[in-house]
Image: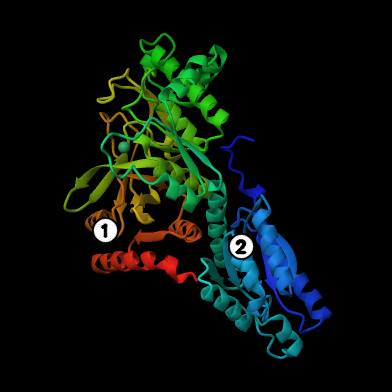
Amino acid sequence: MNANTIELKELEVWLITGSQKLYGEAALRKVAANSQKIAATLDTSGNIPAKVVFKPVVKSPAEATALCQQANTAPNCIGLITWCHTFSPSKMWINGLKQLRKPLVHLHTQFNRDIPWSSIDMDFMNLNQAAHGDREHGFIMSRMRLNRKVVVGFWQDATVQKQIGAWSRAAAAWHDWQGARFARLGDNMREVAVTEGDKVSAQMQFGYSVNGYGIGDLVQHVNAANASEVNALVEQYDAAYAVAPKLRKQGAMRKSLVEAARIEAGLRSFLSEGGFKGFTDTFEDLHGLVQLPGTPVQRLMAEGYGFGAEGDWKTCALVRAMKVMASGLQGGTSFMEDYTYHLSPTDKLVLGAHMLEICPSIAKGRPSLEVHPLGIGGKADPVRLVFDTPPGPGLNASLIDLGNRFRLLVNEVDVVKSRPLPKLPVARTLWRCWPDLATAATAWIYAGGAHHTGFSQAVTTEMLEDFATMAGIELVVIDADTRLREFNQALRWNEVYHHLRSGMMA
Ligand code: MN
């Protein structure tokens, strides 16, 4: 399987029901049957992308521990849903939860939606006591300072299933990061600070590795690309995009398009040979490449590869994670940069773009394939896809290294209708920030957010919040409710909290 493939339905979430032996075999059989029904319903819910698998009801410390150990080593298990239909005395969970290394969502639900007013008796009570059973379950996780998500409500409700779905998407992305490999071609753009970071800390915290390669390692693959593969790509370009006249057959710059296809073939070969899920490059290290990869990067991103320009490996990994979260959803996900502002008194907007590398998954309509000079880098004119982005809600996310920890920063935005930009030769998107540009940019800058982001019209703040919880990192959100004074205060509190947190784990 291609390391890049994203198939969420192959992944499993285990539904584990906590109980005890107090009420006898008949009650436990009924609980197991109820739990199977819940698992089957969640499994077929269109709001939950992963498989939901019923696991035997937990009644003892040995069973809880064994299940957590199985979850740790099951290669397709991305996390657990736990639910305690009645008291499942929590000390029986301690050893298991202590060892659990997969994400957990605590589903606080009840098999019966309504109280059967005229018939309720103690048999009903034995089956429907999550109201107190789940509080005991919550206590032990708070006592153990375990990161988890709590979802409350009737299991058939769409709102409940959507919350579990968002968590599943985050868990899939987290699972995808474990053991993932990202390639850094060349170093970063010289003297830039925000694209730097501690790769050892990142690997310990996030599970993925980032290693550097010389651009020559890629050039070897580009030079080795065979003609038929390059021609096949050229044919794909011709069929998929509105190709500019000078790039068409007989066009004066057809060679540039062929060169882009050769770079794409080489990149594909390099990435698949190394089993990479994403990569970075930099315009300051292109020795042996004829042009900075534009279209090739855009097309690889559209297939699910992570990408960060100018050596930005943190954004590359984040874009990959967001691609996994977004799998199967409407709306695209791309590497992005805050490009320039529209500071009109009545309508303050951000134009987002990059010099080439924006993912066509966010394109409105058919991208046009163009070639233009690039002001920097000193290479031949690179081929790129140019397009606008459809209006609608979206967000930008930035993962930064603060030295002692990582911070994930999110700003919710509304993409607005594009305007004609006949002279701007790059793919772009135009958005309005929540709560407003001044507040959002001020907060972003105080929080140290990068100019590079993962942009998405499919990923939600909830998914990123769940993801940050799984990763055990700080999350800061700028949304419609953001007020600067409170925001700054939260940054100060977080500084202390995250510094002390490691000491609070005992
Ligand atoms: Mn950049």
Residue at (46% x, 40% y) in the render? 210
Query: Residue 227 versus residue 501: which sits nearer the camera?
Result: 501
Q: How is the image coloured?
A: rainbow
Disc 1 target residue? 443
Give the image quarter of residue 316.
Answer: top left
User: On residue 100, which mark appears?
Assistant: 2
Q: Secondary structure at mark 2?
A: loop
Q: Nearer the viewer, mark 1 or mark 2?
A: 2
Q: Is mark 2 within 8 Å of ligand 1?
A: no
Q: Is residue 483 above or below residue 372?
A: below
* Pointer 1 or 2: first along the chain: 2
Work out how far the residue at label 1 is from the one at label 2, CA to CA, in angstroms. Answer: 36 Å
Residue at (62% x, 74% y) in the render? 109
* Residue 127 appears anywhere in the view: yes
Amino acid on which disc 1 is placed: Ala
Q: Secondary structure at mark 1?
A: helix
Residue 312 appears left or right of 349? right
Residue at (58% x, 80% y) in the render? 135
* Residue 329 appears anywhere in the view: no
Which residue lies most toward the right here?
A: 26
Query: Residue 251 versus residue 27: which sits nearer the camera?
Result: 27
Where is residue 363 drawn, in percent x and y? 42, 37
Q: Is residue 67 above or below residue 154?
A: above
Amino acid on which disc 2 is placed: Leu
Where is residue 262 drawn, in percent x and y? 47, 18
Residue 331 appears left or right of 407? right
Where is residue 70 drawn, in percent x and y? 70, 58
Where is residue 505 drawn, in percent x and y? 48, 69
